[in-house]
Image: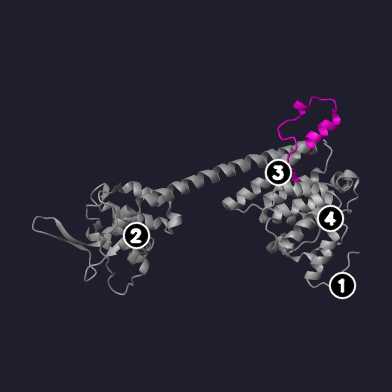
Amino acid sequence: MESGQVTTPFGRRPISLALVRRQQAVAEIKVGKSAEKWKVFRDVSAAMAVLGIQSNSLAVLDALLSFYPENDLRHDATLIVFPSNAQLSLRAHGMAGSTLRRHLAALVEAGLIVRKDSANGKRYVRRGNAGDIENAFGFDLSPLLSRAEELAMLAQQIVAERAAFKRMKENLTICRRDVRKLISAAMEEGADGDWQVIEGIYVELIARLPRTPSPADVSTILEEMQMLKEEVLNRLENQEKAENPSGNAAHIERHIQNSKPESFNELEPSSEKEQGAKSREANGIQREPLKAFPLGLVLKACPEISDYGTGGVIGSWRELMSAAVVVRSTLGISPSAYQEACEIMGPENAAVAVAGILERANMINSPGGYLRNLTRRTERGEFSLGPMIMALLKANGVAHAKAG
């Protein structure tokens, strides 16, 4: 097939090795291969962002395909179209000449078409005595046939990702609505609990969502919003159990099916009375009191966690705990591992432990496993944050800091 030959562009336009490889790949199209041209065009349209082209480039490609007389791109056909720029401009909805040339170059760069230039750069066809095309100079559409399967897979991937993103946004919308209404109901009906704090966490989550969120943004916020919903339901369930101790457990279970759901305490732990005191007295072992060390000392020992605070600054224990949640996710520590650490160590101390793990992250193979180990040792009375903080202070060159 003539279009499989490597040619160089006319004039000052350079040729790259990538362009040479693309032309060589065209020569390797399997005998008998064909593809419906408008199906390939739809695949290109779906994958345009991945291919690095714009909608105007698609308009030019649409115009080029309209000059190819057959519906199918075939291996045994001459896949070169040779319209003038004036003809192309008309079919591309009156596109200006400079814009047309720019988008033709973009299609070449994306590997969707190949230029086959004549000696003088003109586009034309040379026919034999029988009227058959002997040689043609213009734009070769063979790359579309060569990459038909690849383009179809790209399009399917993009469509699947868009559908998943749409579902994720819908789930976030529903979860936001549920959390907002549950909090409002709890506050309006005077349910016991620090609902102002919970509402503050909800508002903070919404504020973190960008105006144009990426899939990663939505995924992160959705995960935390779902944990917040679980925490709200958990608190409401616990209150109902306290008010109706002899009630039917199956009746008050509500939406929570897990007998030990992961709490949202990692985002905004409850008070010392609710969590810390219980964890310190577990198994008769006296734990370190919450906030046993000044926050400033902790930040000197673990300066890296400040990068995860709002604006790169941590000014309170609450901000430290919020930053620890982000670090927990970044290090791959599971929510259950962090929740268990909050229950055993106390929420502030668990945040300090995570900050310490971040400081030594390059030396720890499994941050989640390491935190679980510290939690177990704390439960047995074998671990204290003091030596860890002092060791980090020494490693960071703070020689005379004291934990007083």
The earlier-in-sequence mark between 4 and 1 is 4
Q: In x, y percent, where is residue 161?
A: 51, 47
The earlier-in-sequence mark between 1 and 2 is 2
Q: Are marks 1 and 2 in contact (CB under 8 Å)?
A: no
310 or 300: nearer the viewer: 300
Distance from disc 3 to disc 1, alpha carbons, whole Å, reads 41 Å
Q: In x, y percent, where is residue 273?
A: 88, 46
Of marks 3 and 1, the one in the foreground:
1
The earlier-in-sequence mark between 3 and 4 is 3
* Residue segment shown in magenta: 235-264
Q: Are marks 3 and 4 in contact (CB under 8 Å)?
A: no
Q: Amino acid at mark 3?
A: Met
Residue tagged 1: 400
Q: Quadrant of residue 140?
A: bottom left
Q: Residue drawn 84% across and 58% down? A: 385
Per the image, label 4 sits on a secondary structure element best described as loop
- Taking the image as shown, residue 23 lies to the left or right of residue 275, namely left
Residue tagged 4: 383
Viewport quadrant of the N terminus: bottom left
Residue tagged 2: 95
Q: Are marks 4 and 1 in contact (CB under 8 Å)?
A: no
Residue tagged 3: 227
Distance from disc 4 to disc 2, alpha carbons, whole Å, reads 72 Å
Q: Amino acid at mark 2?
A: Met
Distance from disc 1 to disc 2, alpha carbons, whole Å, reads 72 Å
Q: Residues within 10 Å of mark 2 (few under 14, many from 20)?
A: some
Q: In x, y percent, where is residue 205?
A: 69, 50
Distance from disc 3 to disc 4, alpha carbons, whole Å, reads 29 Å
The mark tally for this picture is: 4
